[in-house]
Image: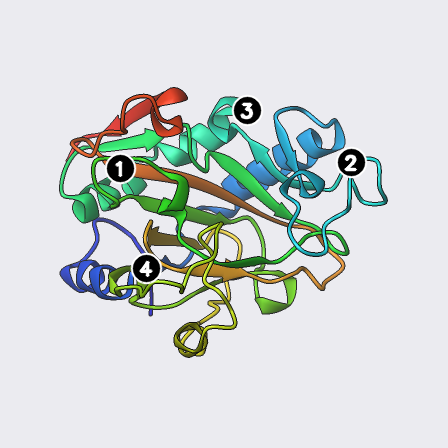
Amino acid sequence: MTDSLPGPLSADQILRFEAEGYLLLRGMVPAADCERMLAVTQDHLRRAVPPIEYEAEVGYEGAPASLDAPGGRTARRLRNAWQRDASFHDWAASPTLVAGLGQLLREDVVLSLAHHNCVMTKHPDFGTATGWHRDIRYWSFTRPDLISVWLALGHEEAGNGALKFIPGSHRIPLAPGQMDALDFLRPEVPENQALFAQGVTPVLERGDVVLFHSKLFHAAGRNDSTQMKASVVFAYRGKSNVPLAGTKSAAAGEVAVGTQ
């Protein structure tokens, strides 16, 4: 399902988000804004402006064995996007985005600085795949109902590691044993294989945005192209859905970005 977003979300869009767990909004961000964010990303990668998470530090299958191994300084994401440049926080707090999120959350909107708040990069050769997971797995809030916002700064498809989703999976009950110790869906479990078969990979172009529920299962493959892929990602909650005291979710601060 795809839609553009010239203004507030329609009733149909809201219903589809609630049913499928995600909503694709074509051409939401102007090309010039995307180019500015991409230019900052490329500059910060070139200068290794911290904080950066490297593939070697995450340690997924196929990642470099250490920071000193070949490809060991391959960035997986630039952290603290909100704090890096005005282009990122201008987008993250843009009135149109906040208005749509307010409709879905049904209350005032707060941006988390503890989760996402980054530019995800996927490089050829050393950029690793990510298994099927939910964003809420390591987040601690009163309710597991947040929204992740993914902005494509360029073309994204299966061949360069685009996001894939299992529609409606934010609503499914899970049986014991379907998840591994890191809260990924175990690929050898028959029930999970049936879920994987339902996965879809939307093709994104520069300026396209995907809103998806924090309980929606999603994954991404390797980048088999010759060009780096970059995407800006933020996470939002409703005002009443506060982070639990003493957790990582409460430690990094938040930004009240708009009212309903």
Q: CA distance from mark 1 to mark 4?
A: 16 Å
Q: Nearer the viewer, mark 2 or mark 3?
A: 2
Q: Residues within 10 Å of mark 4 (few under 14, many from 20)?
A: many
**Which amino acid, by three-letter code, is at mark 2?**
Leu
Q: Nearer the viewer, mark 1 or mark 4?
A: 1
Q: Which residue is mark 1?
A: 237
Q: Which residue is mark 4?
A: 23
- Element on which disc 2 rests: loop
**Which amino acid, by three-letter code, is at mark 3?**
Arg
Q: CA distance from mark 2 to mark 3?
A: 23 Å
Residue beneath the point at 39% across and 21% down: 251
Q: CA distance from mark 2 to mark 4?
A: 37 Å
Q: Position of residue 36 (x, y in %)?
A: 57, 36
Mark 1 touches mark 2? (CB < 8 Å): no
Mark 4 touches mark 3? (CB < 8 Å): no
In the rendered structure, find residue 84 and report the number of the disc placed on it.
Answer: 3
Q: CA distance from mark 1 to mark 3?
A: 22 Å
Task: Give the mark nearest the N terminus, 4 or 3.
Answer: 4
Q: Which residue is mark 2?
A: 67
Residue beneath the point at 14% across and 43% down: 106
Residue beneath the point at 53% across and 59% down: 131
